[in-house]
Image: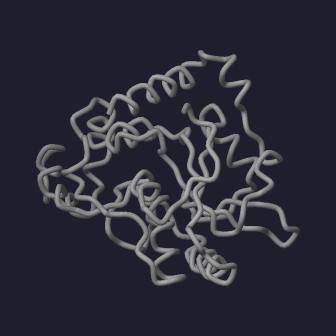
Amino acid sequence: MRRFLRNFLVALLALGGLGFGFLWATNVTAEDLRDLKRGDVIFQISGSGQSLAIMLASASLYSHVGIVDLNDAGQPVVLEAVGPVRETPLEDWISKGKARRVAVYRMEKMTEVQAQSVVTAARAHFGKGYDPYFYSSEDTLYCSELVQIAFRDGIGLTLGQSQRLGDLNLDNFAARAVIERRWKGHPLCADGRAGNAAECLALIRDEKLITPQAIADDPRMVPVFSNFAP
């Protein structure tokens, strides 16, 4: 936890525009990541309004994740669930994140054929909308859910350990604000099933979800690059 808190302070400096010297010196571009392989899993600090809530709830700096693929020209792109599920050129993806922080993990001993199967499985979901409720349905998807499904459908591997929503750290201002904004639209709380955010939370606490950090924590995932603080 102490290590996380130290790293989290670095992230706050980044979010506030401070620590410029450190951030400039450790900036990363797509050109710096020429050794990426198809099927690599790539993490960042998202620039979205829910990013801080995800970071605090999962005790992690990783609030967004995607899968690396190579386009027809051999250039790296990121397959991501952002609404709709789509591919984004790597440099654009890096630029969207906070402070250009990136971490890359690779599935140990994954073959090129397996990697192709993973990205093909991810691409099968292109065009699907984003799931802001982290609900267990594949009609819409959130970022780490896409990654988990791609490895499951592509090579029959369950990547990461899903968690109960209620087991995450929801007792913080950012998570509470997200729940307050979204509870009325949650499939389990809509149409009068819940009268307020607290009642909705009671209904959804047992829902399972997969966080970006849980993907990174899978023991078969090997870190190959990071410009987050050591």
Residue 140 is situated, as x and y percent measured from the top left of the image, at 44, 68
Residue 160 is situated, as x and y percent measured from the top left of the image, at 39, 64
- Position of residue 70 relative to residue 96, above or below, is below
Q: Quick one: quadrant of the C terminus?
A: top right
How many marks the image carries: the answer is 0
- Position of residue 209 relative to residue 13, above or below, is below
Q: Residue at x 25, y 41 (%)?
A: 169
> In which quadrant of the rendered view does residue 99 lie?
top right
Give whichever of 13, 4 is nearer the camera: 4
> In which quadrant of the rendered view does residue 222 lie?
bottom right
Residue occupying the far right of the picture: 73
Q: Which residue is drawn at 28% across and 29% down?
A: 173
Q: Which residue is drawn at 35% across and 72% down?
A: 137
> In which quadrant of the rendered view does residue 172 lie?
top left
The answer to whether residue 6 is left or right of residue 107 is left
- Position of residue 1 relative to residue 222, above or below, is above
Q: Which residue is drawn at 50% across and 75% down?
A: 151
The answer to whether residue 53 is left or right of residue 126 is left
The answer to whether residue 70 is left or right of residue 82 is right
Residue 229 is situated, as x and y percent measured from the top left of the image, at 55, 31
